[in-house]
Image: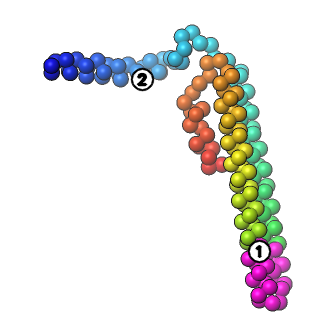
Amino acid sequence: MKSRIVKVLILASIGFIALPVSAKEGNTGVAGAQIDISCIQNAIDERDTSLANMVNIWSSLAGNALEARRDAEKASWNIPSYKERRFSQRKAWSDYGKSLRAANAEKKKERVRIWKKFDHDRKECEGAYSPEMNTGSTYDANL
């Protein structure tokens, strides 16, 4: 009984040792699969260009929100009544918050759309797979 358990453990150990070696040798999981390199390169290019454009648009929206807040806050100090001035200042900050939330929501929606499109495009490319393609969207969650 003990010798059987030892044999099973030895075989399992050999399997775990051999598994990383076969992965390093370029085992794609599909025998004889050819990778459509230009297809995956185009998909990556489209994804990253779209992400860069998304960040630029978000940055512009955030900048516009900051400028609007700045102008509204500066203008509020021209109001002689304390009560009206405070109302104007609170409105400036409230409008700023609304603008940022809208920009962030749009950015997130666009980021998710871009990664879904990339996932679809990647699947269209013969033999192109890398685990980073699945986990990469988690890195971009901070964009």
Give x and y (percent) for residue 65: 78, 63
Q: Residues within 10 Å of mark 2 (few under 14, many from 20)?
A: few
Instruction: Specify whether 84 is left or right of 40.
Output: right
- Can you tell which quarter of the image residue 112 is in? top right
Q: Residue furthest top?
A: 32
Q: Calculate the distance from the C-alpha at mark 1 to the C-alpha at mark 2.
A: 59 Å
Give x and y (percent) for residue 1: 15, 19
- At mark 2, the secondary structure is helix
Judging depth in this view, the residue of 101 and 16 nearest the camera is 101
Residue type, mark 2 in image: Pro
Picture layout, residue 37 above or below residue 85: above
Q: Which mark is residue 91?
A: 1
Q: Earlier in the sequence, mark 1 or mark 2?
A: 2
* Helix, strand or loop: magenta stretch: helix
Q: Residue furthest front?
A: 1
Q: Are marks 1 and 2 in contact (CB under 8 Å)?
A: no
Residue type, mark 1 in image: Lys
- Residue 86 in the magenta stretch? The answer is yes
Residue located 62% across and 22% down the image = 128
Q: Which residues are magenta?
A: 72-92
- At mark 1, the secondary structure is helix
Give x and y (percent) for residue 68: 81, 67
Q: Which mark is residue 20?
A: 2
- Residue 79 in the magenta stretch? The answer is yes
Picture layout, residue 122 above or below residue 72: above
Residue located 59% across and 12% down the image = 33
Give x and y (percent) for residue 59: 75, 54
